[in-house]
Image: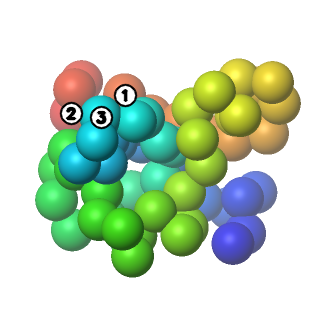
Amino acid sequence: MNMKNEVYGKFQDDTGEEFYCPVNEVADNRVVSEWEVENCVEVSTAGRYSGNLTVIDLDAE
């Protein structure tokens, strides 16, 4: 995973847990699959390291 060049969006898995995932690697607009979550970062974890991810608001698009 190359975090410096990736653009991330906020997604949920089927249990409702939120993740930041590369927007170009998620098939569904809102729900990330078990396979896709391998390339994601939990929102709670990313919050501790703010500034390291480029996150866009998918609802604004």
Residue picked out by circle 2 = 61
Q: Specify the quadrant of the image occupied by residue 44.
A: top right
Task: Look at discs 2 and 1 and give the one toward the viewer.
Answer: 1
In what quadrant of the picture does the N terminus appear? bottom right
In three-dimensional space, the C-alpha distance between marks 1 and 3, rounded to whole angstroms, equals: 18 Å
Q: Mark 2 belongs to which amino acid? A: Glu
In-front residue for pair 15/18: 15
Q: Are marks 2 and 1 in contact (CB under 8 Å)?
A: yes
The percent position of residue 60, horizontal first and vertical second, equals 24, 24
> Is residue 20 visible in this depiction of the protein?
yes
Instruction: Give the SS element for disc 3.
Output: loop
Residue at (51% x, 43% y) in the render: 20
Instruction: Give the SS element for disc 1.
Output: loop
Residue picked out by circle 3 = 16
| Crowd tier of the residue under label 2, counting other residues whose Cα lies within 10 Å: few below 14, some 14–19, many 20 or above | few
Left or right, 49 with reference to 24: right
Give whichever of discs 1 and 3 has the lower sequence position. 3
Task: Look at discs 1 and 3 and give the one toward the viewer.
Answer: 3
Q: Is residue 56 above or below residue 8?
A: above
Residue picked out by circle 1 = 57
Q: Mark 3 belongs to which amino acid? A: Gly
